Amino acid sequence: MAYSLDERLVIGVASSALFDLAESDQVFRRDGEEAYRRYQENHLEDPLQPGIAFSFIRRLLSLNDLSDADDPLVEVIVMSRNDPDTGLRVMESIEHHDLPITRAIFMQGRAPFAFIPTLNISLFLSADESTVRSANQQGFPAGRVLPSATVDDDDDDLRIAFDFDGVLADDKSEQVMQESGLPQFHEHEMANAVAAHDPGPLQPFLLKVAKIQAAERDRKLDDPDYRMRLHIALVTARNAPSHKRAIQSLKSWGVMVNDAFFLGGIDKGAVISVLRPHIYFDDQQGHLASTSTSAPSVHVPFGALNERTESWVPDEAAEGDGV
């Protein structure tokens, strides 16, 4: 019987998100593909160092101890523009770091995101902006991992934080805000308080994460000494009275977050610096410029606002994914 991905949380991750490819990428950009190929072959036994999304991926995979070994809750698939030969160093590095990742797609010079629906992927992470924008434009749940501070404590917790509009929900209400202003936005949300938002690009990812939350609750019932590890936070610029519709939407989706921050314009970076999530998702680049100084931050380039604005370019450009 074929191995089914249908009921699992499946993450697609580019090697540029999982590992630090700064040095490799510099060789490729400066000297070209053949030099890059020789460089990777000569450094095959030199493990790549963890990248921005490494801690998130490692901690997420550790939650597979909630299920039988042959029926994992989480599956991670490497999706890379490297060819299989140069991708060998990526797989060797995965083995070195004891990551239980066994599946990979290597497509020489081509972005493999077309396989996202085929593999039932709920989230695709890459550091390459053009790849992520192209995936998003085709309706795929993609996020660009930005150059950010890393969070990797000594515990085994996993803290995931989300913005709401344009990430978990669609951006229709955000468009009201941008076009008509804050009073009209609140009026619109109050009038529609009991109407759930349409899903945004990462809502399916949240639903799969919620299943892992349920597995933890079941484990807690069986073992009162079990310590809950997965924590989900909502960090949004909404405030009262527009908070009600966001909460109602989550409830209608069957999702419960552990924490919610309705900030009403307060700098998200200040909250993220204390919350210290292992990954934070937002659709607005201005917020991410602040949050990226203290936690791994991911830009979800979804909605009308991202179509109108220029991309945020940090001080240090994000590395690509080899060839």
Image: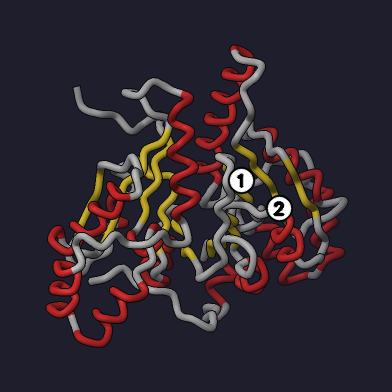
Residue 275 image label: 2
Residue that sits furthest to the top in the current view: 222
Name which residue type carries label 2.
Leu
Under circle 1, the secondary element is strand
Color scheme of the displayed model: secondary structure
The residue where tag 1 is placed is 159
Residue at 83% from the left image edge and 57% from the top image edge = 186
Q: CA distance from mark 1 to mark 2?
A: 8 Å
Under circle 2, the secondary element is helix
Relative to 257, residue 88 above or below: below
Residue 189 position in % (x across, y down):
79, 52
Residue 254 position in % (x across, y down):
63, 30
Q: Which quadrant holds the N terminus?
A: top left
Relative to 132, residue 307 above or below: below
Q: Are marks 1 and 2 in contact (CB under 8 Å)?
A: yes
Quadrant of the image occupied by residue 33: bottom left
Residue 265 position in % (x across, y down):
81, 66
Residue 127 position in % (x across, y down):
41, 67
Q: Is residue 143 left or right of residue 178?
A: left
Q: Residues within 10 Å of mark 2 (few under 14, many from 20)?
A: some
Name which residue type carries label 1.
Arg
Q: Which quadrant holds the C terminus?
A: bottom left
Residue at 20% from the left image edge and 86% from the top image edge = 31
Q: Residues within 10 Å of mark 1 (few under 14, many from 20)?
A: many
Q: Is residue 70 visible?
A: yes
Q: Is residue 298 left or right of residue 268?
A: left
Q: Is residue 302 visible?
A: no
Quadrant of the image occupied by residue 267: bottom right
Q: Earlier in the sequence, mark 1 or mark 2?
A: 1
* Residue closest to the eye, 213 or 23: 23
Quadrant of the image occupied by residue 37: bottom left
